[in-house]
Image: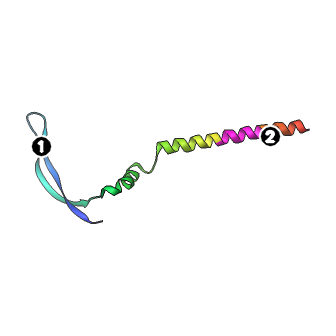
């Protein structure tokens, strides 16, 4: 990935109608990412955490725990009835 020259504003001026305009431009070198890198950039910025996937995983874990607990109770009662 090569660096490219990018035009940026160095100083801003406020006009009488409260709009801002650039009064001084400067060229700097920076990395320009292609549009295909959007997914990787989102992952980098957000840290790879997805609230939706967390809810699915946490809900699945609780569901499996409840199922296991319920099955364990049923098996325990069946063993007690055998005696």
* Residue placed furthest toward the left: 16
- The foreground one among 14 and 39 is 39
- Dot label at residue 9: none
Element at label 1:
strand
In the displayed structure image, the side of residue 79 where residue 71 appears, left or right: left
Residue 80 is covered by the magenta coloring: no
Residue 43 position within the rendered picture, expressed as x and y whole percent measured from the top left: 41, 52
Crowding near the residue tagged with mark 2, few <14, some 14–19, many ≥20 C-alpha atoms within 10 Å: few
Q: Furthest residue to the top?
A: 17
The residue closer to the viewer here, 21 or 41, is: 41
Residue drawn at x 61%, y 43% as measured from the top left: 61
**Vertical order, 5 against 51 (above or below):** below
User: Residue 20, position in %: x, y?
Assistant: 13, 40
Which of the two labelled residues, at mark 1 and mark 2, occupies the earlier sequence position?
1
Comparing labels 1 and 2, the label whose residue is closer to the camera: 2
Give how far apart the Cα atoms at labels 1 and 2 are: 75 Å
As drawn, the label of residue 75 is 2
Work out which residue is located at the far bottom of the displayed protein and give it.
2
Find residue 31 and report its horizontal and vertical position in percent: 27, 60
Left/right placement of residue 72 relative to residue 9 reads right
Q: Which residue is at 46% across, 48% downward?
A: 49
Q: What secondary structure prevails in the magenta region?
A: helix
Q: How many marks?
A: 2
Q: Residues within 10 Å of mark 1 (few under 14, many from 20)?
A: few
Q: Secondary structure at mark 2?
A: helix
**In this view, which residue lies farthest toward the front?**
36
Image disc number at residue 21: 1
Q: Magenta part of the protein: which range? A: 64-73
In the image, residue 43 above or below residue 1: above
């Amino acid at each position: 990935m090569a660096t490219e020259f990018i035009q940026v504003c160095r100083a801003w001026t406020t006009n009488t109608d409260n709009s801002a305009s650039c009064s001084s431009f400067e060229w700097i070198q920076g990395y320009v990412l292609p549009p295909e890198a959007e997914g990787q950039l989102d992952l980098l910025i957000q840290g790879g955490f997805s609230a939706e996937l967390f809810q699915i995983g946490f809900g699945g874990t609780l569901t499996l725990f409840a199922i296991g607990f319920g099955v364990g109770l049923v098996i325990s009662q069946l063993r007690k009835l055998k005696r």
